[in-house]
């Protein structure tokens, strides 16, 4: 039977060898500073847009790690509405998406970065507004009362990867974690984010949603480390890209001793790649802004504005007249007129494959 780190004496007295990651931490700090410098040059409006794009990615990808696919347009609408941004209300978001968004915004966008059991319970209630996880009724907004195992494999072929602390220990375990999180120390705030993530998922205090809440706790601490209440890189998106190695290092660390150097190195590498990947979002925001500076005066109606924005955000598949008509709730004739107008103005071009698969692309390279 496996021994897990939480079963070791004084298990939260984590140890690490700083020499194994000091240069990596320095590199991350340098990238962090460069990113925030680049963001400052964007200006107020584009900073808001970059923050919105990052939060959309964070919410969608954090849920996808758990196998839950959220509609990016609904996530965009929910976040934009709560942040008071212009493209709110384009698509109504359901209650569940609003809950995930509310948790993420509460963790990252406000000055109050203090954890409490009530705050964590609020996040949990936001994730499970109906008191269910899929078909199963779960305990919401309180610590779990039963055992918790992380298991993979089908019926009869289950593999137990991890077993969390017993329910009767949760109150004292979470009190200790919350006190540690809220106490200022000499610990580097990025290292603190790394330890907070590991500590929370090791305790696994809820019936469900532990991964998403752990990532929200991590994002809260990273926003403290960045010194800003906006997000410009997505740790969740990077964890999703490295999902197999994420679960592997967690399992290895939770079955090891109190030396968590390997976990910290993995976390810093993941964070480094997340910051590097933020360039994609920054480029998208700047190019979209440049597109509208050049073309705003050529737009004839709101349908065209809506569809061009959608095309530059999260458009799936090819842009056709039938998709245009469906999304704008207009006729095929109106859709074709809108598109032809944009082709004549040099904004859209007809893609090379014609016939029944006629579709259109942006002439202005994005």
Image: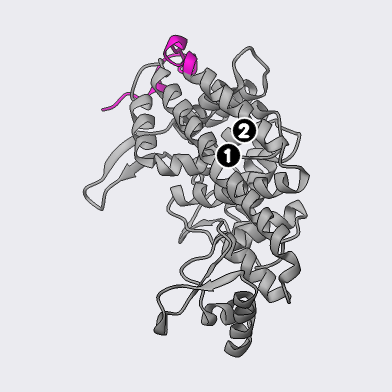
Snapshot colouring: one colour
| In the depicted structure, whether residue 324 falls above or below residue 78 | below
Q: CA distance from mark 1 to mark 2?
A: 9 Å
Q: Are marks 1 and 2 in contact (CB under 8 Å)?
A: yes
Instruction: Tell me the magenta residue range.
Output: 1-23
Q: What residue sits 62% from the left and 24% below the top?
A: 181
How many marks the image carries: the answer is 2
User: In front here: 86 or 292?
Assistant: 292
Residue 44 in view (yes/no): yes
Q: Which mark is residue 233?
A: 1
Q: What residue sits 26% from the left and 28% below the top?
A: 1
Position of residue 55 measured from the top left corner of the image (x, y, whole percent): 62, 47
Q: What residue sits 57% from the left and 80% below the top?
A: 326
In-image side of 266 versus 177 (left or right): left
Mark closer to the observer (1, 2): 2
User: In front here: 306 or 259?
Assistant: 306
In-image side of 141 versus 272 (left or right): right
In-image side of 235 versus 150 (left or right): right
From the image, tell me which residue sits under label 2. Answer: 35
| In the depicted structure, whether residue 251 falls above or below residue 61 | above
């Amino acid at each position: 039977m496996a021994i897990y780190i939480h079963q070791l004496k004084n298990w939260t007295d984590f140890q690490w060898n700083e020499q194994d990651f000091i240069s990596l931490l320095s590199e991350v700090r340098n990238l962090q500073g460069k990113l925030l410098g680049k963001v400052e040059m964007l200006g107020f409006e584009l900073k808001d847009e970059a923050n919105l794009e990052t939060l959309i990615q964070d919410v969608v990808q954090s849920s996808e790690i758990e196998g839950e696919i959220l509609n990016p347009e609904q996530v965009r609408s929910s976040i934009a509405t709560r942040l008071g941004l212009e493209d709110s209300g384009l698509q109504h978001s359901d209650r569940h998406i609003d809950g995930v968004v509310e948790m993420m915004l509460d963790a990252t966008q406000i000055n109050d970065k203090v954890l409490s059991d009530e705050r964590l319970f609020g996040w949990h209630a936001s994730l499970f507004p109906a008191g269910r996880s899929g078909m199963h009724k779960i305990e919401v907004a309180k610590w779990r009362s039963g055992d918790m195992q992380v298991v993979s494999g089908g019926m009869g072929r289950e593999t137990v990867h991890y077993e969390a602390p017993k329910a009767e220990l949760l109150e004292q375990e979470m009190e200790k974690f919350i006190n540690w999180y809220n106490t200022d120390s000499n610990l580097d705030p990025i290292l603190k984010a790394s330890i907070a993530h590991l500590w929370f998922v090791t305790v696994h205090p809820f019936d469900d949603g532990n991964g998403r809440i752990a990532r929200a706790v991590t994002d809260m601490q990273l926003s403290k480390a960045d010194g800003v209440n906006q997000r410009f890189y997505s740790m969740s998106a990077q964890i999703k890209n490295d999902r197999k190695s994420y679960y592997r290092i967690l399992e290895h660390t939770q079955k090891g001793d109190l030396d968590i150097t390997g976990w910290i190195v993995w976390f810093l590498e993941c964070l480094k790649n997340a910051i590097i990947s933020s360039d994609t979002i920054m480029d998208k925001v700047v190019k979209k802004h440049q597109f509208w500076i050049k073309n705003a005066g050529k737009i004839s109606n709101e349908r065209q504005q809506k569809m061009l924005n959608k095309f530059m955000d999260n458009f799936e598949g090819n842009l056709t007249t039938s998709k245009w008509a469906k999304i704008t709730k207009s006729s095929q004739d109106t859709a074709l007129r809108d598109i032809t107008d944009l082709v004549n103005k040099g904004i859209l071009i007809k893609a090379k494959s014609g016939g029944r698969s006629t579709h259109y692309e942006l002439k202005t390279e994005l």
